[in-house]
Image (tube, rainbow, N blue to C red):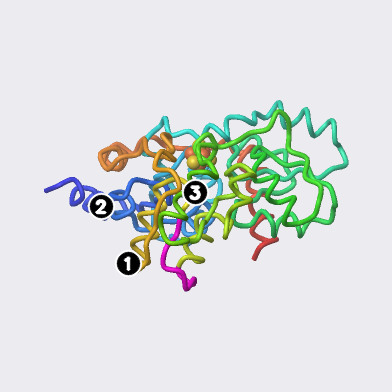
Amino acid sequence: MNLTEKIEQLKKEKKAVILAHNYQRPEIQDIADYTGDSIELSRQAAEEKNAKILVFSAVDFMAESAAILNPEKTVLLPSSGARCPMAQMLPLTQVKMWKKKYPKIPLVLYVNTLAEAKTECEVCCTSANAVEVIKAIDADTLLFGPDTNLAWYVQQKTGKKIIPIPPGGFCPTHLLFMKEDALLRKQEHSNAVIMVHPECSPDVQEIADFIGSTSQMCKYAKNSSSQRFVVATETGLLHRLKKENPNKEFYSAYEGGVCPNMKLNTLERIYLALKTEQTRITVPAAVAKKAKDALEKMYKLTS
Ligand code: SF4
């Protein structure tokens, strides 16, 4: 039996489902039951009524959210070291400090935070629904963390004042994209459409034809009459874009835009995770309860 067949067999035996983020390696996306962004995967995880195990091929905060929303299931992260550096940039102490400084301003946290930070916020948001969430809150000024680039994007789109929690977090992978590369690619590929993730810096966002989360990019590319696209987000998304649109062309704005944390997951590690049921992701009950409120409020505001 090859590795893929062994994974399939273990999945059946253990009633497991594999959920892979859009930034996962192509071979993982191909064997996954579902591929998507963090919100799509969390929703899917909750739909899996018969599954006992969720193999969350992504990074720590996404697996934590899956564990919070699915307490009756075992959530496994194939690579224990797959941690998002942006989430680590906003520790609980920092959140508490800035909340104390602005006690009357509602705090919104990007889902790219650890569960304990989520316990302090009014509501969470993803890059796909940040604008909708911020618009739905009855306040003109909001405190936001950790991503300063997403904060900038939301401020442009909503006209509200968004205060990024100092010193400000960022995604080291999306920071690698430069407008010069994207514009050169656009020129090389007959005026291709430039799609940019809001975690990219403002100057890259400013030259975009379309700004959106990975799921929004997939939708946009599918519905667009354009044939060629330059993509400024982690290169893993190109696999899904090409698969869903075999007649269109997709080019990375910068091939070095690879998240080393996302890529820690491999087929071998998925096989071992299923076999040993490690690494299990659990969240203490008191933390999970409060973080769940913030996540569920997000779903309520955007449903
Ligand atoms: S791409 Fe950026 S935000 Fe996403 S997991 Fe990697 S470091 Fe974190």
* Residue located beneath label 3 in the image: 182
* Residue located beneath label 2 in the image: 13
The local crowd at label 3, few if under 14, some if 14 to 19, many if 20 or more residues have their Cα within 10 Å, is many
| Image position of 176 (left or right of 127) | left
| Image position of 83 (left or right of 88) | left
Picture coordinates of residue 142, whole percent (x, y): 80, 45
Decide which of tag 1 and tag 2 comes sooner along the chain: 2
Circles 1 and 3, Cβ within 8 Å, touching? The answer is no
* Residue located beneath label 1 in the image: 246
Total count of labels: 3
* Residue 130 within the segment the image draws in magenta: no
Q: Quadrant of the C terminus?
A: bottom right
Residue furthest to the right: 104
Picture coordinates of residue 252, whole percent (x, y): 42, 49
70 shown above or below 132: above
Amino acid type, residue under disc 2 in the picture: Glu
Residue span colored magenta: 222-230
Which quadrant of the figure has residue 255? top left
Residue 282 seen in this snapshot: no
Front: mark 2 or 3 = 3
Amino acid type, residue under disc 1 in the picture: Pro
* Residue 227 within the segment the image draws in magenta: yes
Q: Residue at x 73, y 34 (%)?
A: 165
Picture coordinates of residue 96, whole percent (x, y): 75, 30
Instruction: Give me the C-alpha separation between circle 1 and circle 3.
Output: 22 Å
